[in-house]
Image (tube, rainbow, N blue to C red):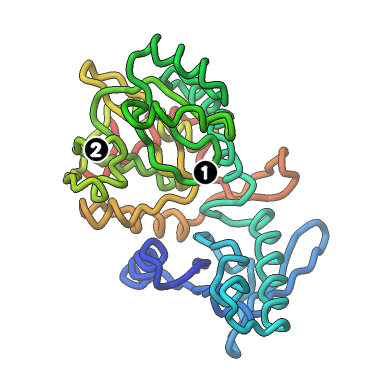
C-alpha cells in the first residue's frame, strides 16, 4: 500500500493515483486541502517510530505503507490557509492543519519506507551554486558560471564568453534569458540582487526523469531560450522520447543517488559535438507535462518503486531505519532501465 500526499487534482499526483488503481496497488490519498479532517498519531517504541493516519472513520498503520509520494504545497499557501485574500479562515481548522502538516513532515523524514522525496534531501535545490558542485562531482559538465551583483564583473564575463544567460540563484523559479539588447541596459539593477550568469551552451535540451532505478529522457526542440515559456514568445515546442548514451543514463542515476532523490528531473543539454551539460536537478518535478507529451510511463515507474518491497538498511547519517532504493555497491550502469530499450547488456 502506498500513500500519496498533496492535492489530488494536480496532474502529477492524479497520474500516480490512476496508475496505482490500474496496477491494482492499494493507495491512500492524503488531500492536504482537507487536512483539518485528518488525524495522525506517532509514538516511539524501542527506537522505532510507529503510528497511524486516520480520516473519515478509516485508519491506516503508518508501517503498512511501502512508499510515499510527496507533492505537498507549503501549508501557508493553501487557499484554506490564505489570509491575504481576506477570505474568512477558521482559526481552529487552520491550527489543526498546520499541526498535522508539521507532524506528517516529521514522520516522512524518519519513515521506514520509500519516500519520493524527503524534505531534507530536497534542500540541495535551495542553492543552485551548491547543487552545481554536487552535479559536477557526479561527473557532469557545467557551464562557466559567475554569481555576482557587480555590473562590471558581468560585462567582463560577457566579453569573455560573448553570449551568456542569467537566472535565479535560489530554488525560486525564474525565466532563463540571454543577456543582450534591452536587458543589457537594465544591468545596473543587478546591484540589488546577486544573480547567476552562465555561458550560453548551444544544442538540444534533454529533460531526464529518474524514478527509482528507471530513466526517462525527453528531447525538447525549440528556438526559445527557456522552453518552459516558449508559448509566451509565440514559439513552438516539440518533445520526443530519446535514448541516452549508457554512461549518461548511469550518471543521471548516480546523481539522483548522490542527492538522495529517488525521483528527480535533471536538465541536460546535448551540444552539437555530443557533450552533455547539466544545469539543475529538480527535486519535485512536474513530470506529467513530459509524460502527457511523450507517453512515457513515468507515473508507472513511481508506482513500481513505491509499491515494491526492499530490504531495510541502517542509514548511519540520519540515525534512522530507511528503505533502501539501490545497492551502493552496484555499478550504476546496471541500474539503468530505459522503457524503450530494457536493461543494458
Q: Are marks 1 and 2 in contact (CB under 8 Å)?
A: no
The reply, left or right, for residue 160 in relation to residue 94 is left
Residue position marked by numbered label 2 in the rendering: 224
Taking 238 as reference, is 288 above or below it? Answer: below
State the quadrant of the C terminus: top left
Badge 2 density bin: few <14, some 14–19, many ≥20, Cα 10 Å: some
Taking 258 as reference, is 31 above or below it? Answer: below
Q: Which mark is residue 93?
A: none
The reply, left or right, for residue 41 in relation to residue 306 is right
Residue pictured at 24% horizontal, 57% vertical: 292
Q: Residue furthest top?
A: 160
Counting from the top left corner in percent of width and height, residue 336 is at 35, 36
The answer to whether residue 19 shows anywhere in this view is: yes
The answer to whether residue 278 shows anywhere in this view is: no
The reply, left or right, for residue 229 in relation to residue 152 is left
Q: Secondary structure at mark 2?
A: loop
Going from the N terminus, do you reach mark 1 or mark 2 first? 2
Pick the front one: 339 or 97: 97
Residue position marked by numbered label 1 in the rendering: 261
Q: Residue furthest front?
A: 185
Counting from the top left corner in percent of width and height, residue 302 is at 41, 55
Counting from the top left corner in percent of width and height, residue 190 is at 53, 30
Q: Mark 1 and mark 2: span between their CA atoms?
A: 29 Å
Q: Secondary structure at mark 1?
A: loop
The quadrant holding residue 200 is top left
Residue pictured at 33% horizontal, 19% vertical: 163
Residue pictured at 46% horizontal, 61% vertical: 307
Residue pictured at 52% horizontal, 16% vertical: 153
Counting from the top left corner in percent of width and height, residue 13 is at 42, 65
Taking 156 as reference, is 73 above or below it? Answer: below
Taking 265 as reference, is 29 above or below it? Answer: below
The quadrant holding residue 248 is top left
Amino acid at each position: 500500500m502506498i500513500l500519496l500526499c498533496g492535492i489530488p487534482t494536480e496532474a502529477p499526483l492524479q497520474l500516480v493515483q490512476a496508475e496505482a488503481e490500474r496496477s491494482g496497488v492499494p493507495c491512500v490519498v492524503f488531500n492536504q486541502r482537507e487536512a483539518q479532517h485528518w488525524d495522525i498519531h506517532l509514538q516511539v517504541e524501542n527506537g522505532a517510530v510507529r503510528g497511524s493516519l486516520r480520516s473519515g472513520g478509516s485508519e491506516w498503520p503508518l508501517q503498512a505503507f511501502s512508499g510515499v509520494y510527496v507533492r505537498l504545497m507549503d501549508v501557508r499557501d493553501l487557499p484554506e490557509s490564505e489570509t491575504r485574500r481576506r477570505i474568512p479562515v477558521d482559526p481552529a481548522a487552520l491550527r489543526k492543519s498546520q499541526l498535522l502538516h508539521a507532524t506528517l513532515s516529521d514522520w516522512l523524514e524518519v519513515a521506514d519506507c520509500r519516500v519520493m522525496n524527503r524534505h531534507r534531501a530536497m534542500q540541495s535545490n535551495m542553492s543552485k551554486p551548491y547543487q552545481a558542485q554536487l552535479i559536477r562531482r557526479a561527473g557532469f559538465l557545467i557551464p562557466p558560471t559567475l554569481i555576482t551583483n557587480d555590473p562590471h564583473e558581468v560585462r567582463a564575463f560577457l566579453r569573455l564568453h560573448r553570449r551568456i544567460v542569467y537566472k535565479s540563484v535560489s530554488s525560486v523559479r525564474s525565466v532563463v534569458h540571454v543577456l543582450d539588447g534591452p536587458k543589457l541596459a537594465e544591468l545596473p539593477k543587478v546591484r540589488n540582487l546577486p544573480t547567476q550568469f552562465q555561458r550560453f551552451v548551444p544544442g538540444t535540451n534533454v529533460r531526464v526523469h529518474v524514478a527509482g532505478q528507471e530513466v526517462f529522457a525527453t528531447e525538447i526542440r525549440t528556438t526559445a531560450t527557456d522552453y518552459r515559456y516558449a508559448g509566451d514568445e509565440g514559439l513552438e515546442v516539440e518533445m520526443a522520447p530519446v535514448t541516452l548514451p549508457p554512461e549518461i543514463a548511469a550518471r543521471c542515476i548516480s546523481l539522483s543517488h548522490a542527492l538522495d532523490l529517488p525521483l528527480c528531473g535533471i536538465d541536460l543539454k546535448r551540444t552539437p559535438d555530443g557533450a552533455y551539460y547539466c544545469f539543475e536537478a529538480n527535486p519535485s518535478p512536474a513530470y506529467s507535462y513530459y509524460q502527457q507529451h511523450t507517453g512515457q510511463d513515468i507515473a508507472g515507474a513511481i508506482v513500481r518503486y513505491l509499491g515494491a518491497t526492499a530490504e531495510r538498511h541502517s542509514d548511519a547519517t540520519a540515525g534512522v531505519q530507511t528503505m533502501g532504493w539501490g545497492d551502493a555497491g552496484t555499478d550504476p550502469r546496471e541500474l539503468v532501465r530505459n522503457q524503450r530499450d530494457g536493461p543494458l547488456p
